[in-house]
Image (cartoon, grey):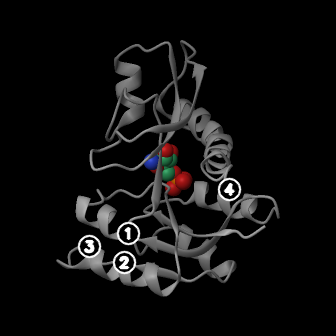
């Protein structure tokens, strides 16, 4: 099986990245992670990249042409697929068009509900009974592309932001790999 060269974009802890890295070691998993992009030099995912000898780039998003720089790195590393795993920058329409290949994102809510930031506190404030996570294609509108996989769980009356986050992320570790398998099922 020829695996798809993949770049993972991160900004923070990189726990989804870690999970995808583990899964990608499985010979039947469709992707191989060849590059990691981060906009945060303190991202824990960098430690992971170093440990696993995966090339990584720290991007200075204050530069006007930083997306062009990313596109250059993607080209240089023959990247054909992007996973956004907690990347806290909005990707421009121009970037999506220029890359021209599949980009997926994981979001910690049942989209189209609770797009954007501070998801867990908003879910609690709205007294939702269920929540979950969604993997979707990245389109030109924020958190709005076609849904690939979405899974949910019931919220307990004693759940708080911390427990919701933990439960949602545990679900993400199952949902993200499943969505990637689905994307490349007929590849
Ligand atoms: C995840 O919960 C994801 O849904 C959101 O950002 C978080 C990233 O977590 N987009 P991590 O960096 O993978 O630990």
In front of the other: 59 or 76:
76
Between label 4 and label 1, give the one nearer the viewer: 1
Residue 146, above or below 88:
above
Q: Position of residue 120 (x, y in %)?
A: 42, 32
Q: Secondary structure at mark 3?
A: loop
Q: CA distance from mark 1 to mark 3?
A: 18 Å
Q: Which residue is mark 4?
A: 19
Q: Which corner quadrant holds the N terminus?
A: bottom right
Q: Residues within 10 Å of mark 1 (few under 14, many from 20)?
A: some
- The image's mark for residue 99 is 1
Q: CA distance from mark 2 to mark 1?
A: 7 Å
Q: CA distance from mark 2 to mark 3?
A: 13 Å
Q: Secondary structure at mark 1?
A: helix
Q: Which residue is mark 2?
A: 71
Q: Residues within 10 Å of mark 2 (few under 14, many from 20)?
A: some
Q: Secondary structure at mark 4?
A: helix
């Amino acid at each position: 099986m020829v695996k798809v060269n993949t770049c993972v974009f991160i900004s923070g802890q990189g726990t989804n990245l870690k999970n995808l890295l583990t899964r990608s070691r499985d010979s039947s998993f469709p992707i191989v992670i060849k590059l990691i992009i981060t906009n945060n030099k303190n991202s824990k995912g960098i430690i992971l990249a170093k440990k696993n000898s995966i090339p990584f780039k720290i991007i200075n998003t204050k530069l006007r042409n930083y997306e062009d720089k990313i596109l250059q790195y993607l080209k240089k590393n023959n990247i054909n697929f992007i996973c956004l795993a907690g990347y806290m920058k909005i990707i421009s329409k121009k970037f999506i068009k220029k890359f021209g290949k599949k980009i997926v994102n994981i979001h910690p809510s049942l989209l189209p509900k609770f797009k954007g930031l501070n998801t867990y506190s908003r879910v609690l404030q709205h007294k939702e009974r269920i929540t979950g996570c969604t993997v979707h294609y990245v389109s030109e509108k924020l958190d709005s592309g076609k849904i690939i996989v979405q899974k949910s769980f019931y919220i307990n009356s004693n759940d708080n932001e911390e427990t919701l986050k933990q439960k949602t992320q545990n679900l993400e570790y199952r949902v993200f790999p499943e969505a990637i398998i689905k994307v490349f099922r007929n590849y």
